Amino acid sequence: MNKEEIYQFITNNPVFFLATIENDKPRCRGMFLYKADEQAGIVFHTGANKDVFKQISKNSNVEMCFNDFKSGKQIRVSGTLE
């Protein structure tokens, strides 16, 4: 897949799983995509009062997993959040 196809896959499958770290233990939860494109990157939001926000603030290294259950494909994205 090229970059454009990856962004299209992500956009077409906006529910994803986000993995963070808290006290050296992984935490994973479902999230909803706001948008994804080459200019903005992968954009989602959460409230500052949520545990996920606190986890990201302490350690911004995460992994996201986008699934297309109809085709049986998934894309995992690892990186640092801004």
Image (spheres, helix red, strand yellow):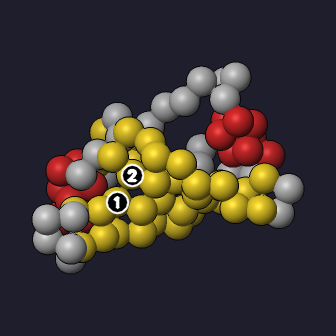
The residue under the point 33% across, 46% down is 15
Point out which mark residue 19 bears. none
In the rendered view of the protein, which quadrant contains the N terminus? bottom left
Residue 53 quadrant: top right
Element marked by disc 1: strand
Q: Is residue 82 above or below residue 67?
A: above
SS of the residue under disc 2:
strand
Neighbourhood count class around disc 1 (C-alpha, 10 Å): few under 14, some 14–19, many 20 upward: many
Residue 41 appears in the picture as rendered: no
State the CA–CA distance, disc 1 to disc 2.
5 Å
Amino acid type for the residue under numbered disc 1? Phe
Q: Which residue is mark 2?
A: 16
- Residue 10 or residue 82, whichever sits in front: 10
Residue furthest right in the image: 23
Where is residue 43 shown, x and y percent of the image? 41, 40
Residue contact between numbered discs 1 and 2, judged by CB atoms under 8 Å? yes
Going 85% across and 56% down the picture, which residue do you hit? 23
**Amino acid type shown at disc 2:** Phe
- Identify the image quadrant of the C terminus: top right
Q: Earlier in the sequence, mark 1 or mark 2?
A: 2
Q: Is residue 2 above or below residue 52?
A: below
Q: Residues within 10 Å of mark 2 (few under 14, many from 20)?
A: many
The residue wearing badge 1 is: 66
